[in-house]
Amino acid sequence: MTQQPETLHYAVSVVGKDRPGIVAAITEGFFHLGCNIADSSCTMLAGEFAMILIVSHPRPFSKTRLMDELKPSCDRLGMSLAVRSLANDEVHRQEAEGEICLVSVYGADQPGIVFRVTRELARQGINITDLTTKLIGTREEPVYVMMLEAALPDGQTPELLENLLEKLKKELNVEISVRIVTPVSL
């Protein structure tokens, strides 16, 4: 039985002004190197594009080689690049424990919404697995929207969480709802 070569893993982040072709340029570099993209997230934030990827490559390979391949594309696109080597114990895919729910927050834009809601979730031992915010509405009447995906610990239910957030909802004068995300089987 042949032993598989040890695989190296890297966290790669790229940030810069949004434009078409960023994902193609960066992933082309991974393709040329023979890297596998295990996990990724990309988004546009106020005209900036951000992507973070977890990539792997069998040994022998180096972080320097990865940087050397990606840097020209990043420079050409005006993007910043960061690469971090991951230890073996950092690369095991970890699914969130507990039932997954979606927490949505809508209200007048004001400082502290993200902090106050996430602080309360942390106090309840709730792990946030994804968070997105954006302003909608008009310049005169902006509406702040925050969507959180979170893993509820044992004993916590969406109804209990919504009740716990009721005081905060009134203090911030926002709408907060919590619902279960039904997993889809492939």
Image: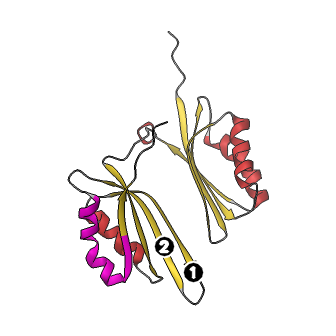
Colour option used: secondary structure
Q: Badge 2 is on which residue?
A: 145
Residue 116 image label: none
Q: Foreground residue, 153 or 184?
A: 184
Q: In this view, does 62 lie to the left or right of 100?
A: right
**View extreme (left): residue:** 155
- Give the x, y percent position of residue 19: 74, 62
Q: Residues within 10 Å of mark 2 (few under 14, many from 20)?
A: many
**View extreme (top): residue:** 1
Label the magenta part by its dominant secondary structure.
Answer: helix
**Residue 165 colored magenta?**
yes
Q: Foreground residue, 166 or 153?
A: 166
Looking at the rendered structure, the kind of residue marked 1 is Gly
Please say if 93 is above or below 18.
above
* Secondary-structure class at tag 2: strand
- Give the x, y percent position of residue 95: 39, 43
Residue placed at 32% from the left, 78% from the top?
169
- Quadrant of the image occupied by residue 7: top right
Q: Badge 1 is on which residue?
A: 137
Q: Is residue 180 left or right of residue 45?
A: left
Quote the CA–CA distance across marks 1 and 2.
10 Å
Which mark is first along the chain, 2 or 1? 1
Residue placed at 45% from the left, 38% from the top?
185
Looking at the rendered structure, the kind of residue marked 2 is Val
* Secondary-structure class at tag 1: strand
- Quadrant of the image occupied by residue 38: top right
Please say if 186 is above or below 20.
above
Please say if 145 is above or below 72.
below
The range drawn in magenta is: 158-176
